[in-house]
Image: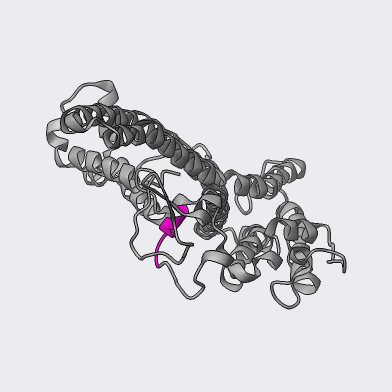
Amino acid sequence: MFGDTGHGIIMTLFALWMVWKERQLASVKDEIFSMFYGGRYIILLMGLFSMYTGLIYNDIFSKSINLFGSSFSTNEPDVINGTIIFNNITQGLIPYENMDPNYVYWFGIDPVWQLAQNKVIYLNTYKMKVSVILGVLQMFFGVVLSLFNHIHFRKPVSIMFEFIPQLIFLIGIFGYMDFMIIWKWFNYSSSDSAKAPSVLITLINMFMFRMPLDNDPPYLKEEMFDGQYSIIQPVCLILAVVCIPIMLIVKPVYNHCIKKSSGGGGGGHDGHDGDGSFGDAFINQAIHTIEYCLGSVSHTASYLRLWALSLAHAQLSEVLWNMVMKNGFMEFHHGPPNYLNIVSGAVMFVVFSIWAVLTVAILIVMEGLSAFLHALRLHWVEFMSKFYSGAGIVFMPFSFRVIIDEL
């Protein structure tokens, strides 16, 4: 969400300064600064990962850096009033017309996209798919963590009839969606992209059990691999649907049968209190099942905030550059010849000061806080809901000092 190497460097340097001077800064009593100081290590990690995602997006202060050349070639540029204009770029890049298919840009995004009019369209598609892939992977990791809970509390029934169906449901629908995205990246080039199947429409057809028709366009009837429509998709959907009643019914029925066979006394079985009725246990399981199944859909869509906030940050950064710094450079270029060094230098000093203040205040502080809050929500709701449940146990953060004091 905060993919800008330049802004990430500023944030990292600020966090490193607080870490380096943490003993001296610990005595500062300012309330606002104390919040930054308390989160200095989180800010450091935020800055480092912002630099990393900025390199992936090839974005530094809304500009791109040319590290590995470019796979695009354009027509001879036109020179108008000393300004170089590439015809193909101003009209939008067309990969199958302008790109060398044998060239690979090794890390990040080709810098020539920064000049293209269809840059936003391309980045939208890329960031949207990456967001969904990361989201499903994190939810998958959260479901896997629930296995360790079941093992720790000795709940074999929960492993068989809750963990495994949850895993099959998630992989059968959303894992399959991620697989199609990655498969398209590796098996379709710009030359045959027109017939590449749409992932979204393929999923809709999968839920409707709709087979491609003869009069459908190529991107609707093209199979990514053999047996996709006739075997793979029906099997994935049937397995996902079958898992729903298994998660809903088996566990409460099993616990109720065990409770009756033991005479209804004693403690609970598989984590449920023995005093509760079958109706209460069934309603509780129904709530968890509905929450998981519907949550898998809504949580996957919720990860699209990675794309939305990343796009908003990039566009704000670009607007700030074009409306402030670019005007300053134009003033520097068109300044009076006799006073170019003095007048234009003073103008650039003022322009840069305004740009720097707005960059720190809006793009780093406000946007950084916004990205932090959204990331916190993704961890707390979309990720931790897969394995964590607040059951009245007080949370105790890990601390070596507490352990030593208890000894």
On-image quarter of the N terminus: top left
* Residue lying farthest to the top in this orientation: 30
Where does the magenta region start and end? 106-114
Horizontal arrangement in the rendering, residue 291 relative to residue 91 (left or right): right
Residue found 51% across the figure and 45% down from its top: 306
Q: Is residue 11 above or below residue 219?
A: above
Q: Magenta segment: does it hold 275?
A: no
Q: Which is nearer the eye, 236 or 185?
A: 185
Q: Is residue 76 above or below residue 84?
A: below
Q: Is residue 311 above or below residue 133?
A: above
Residue found 69% across the figure and 46% down from its top: 294
Residue 149 appears anywhere in the view: no
User: Residue 215's x, y, as percent?
Assistant: 87, 65
Q: Which is nearer the eye, 236 or 346?
A: 346
Q: Tell me which corner region of the image, top left, top right, bottom left or bottom right, holds residue 208.
A: bottom right
Residue found 31% across the figure and 41% down from its top: 43
Q: Tell me which corner region of the image, top left, top right, bottom left or bottom right, holds residue 394.
A: top left
Residue 91 appears anywhere in the view: yes
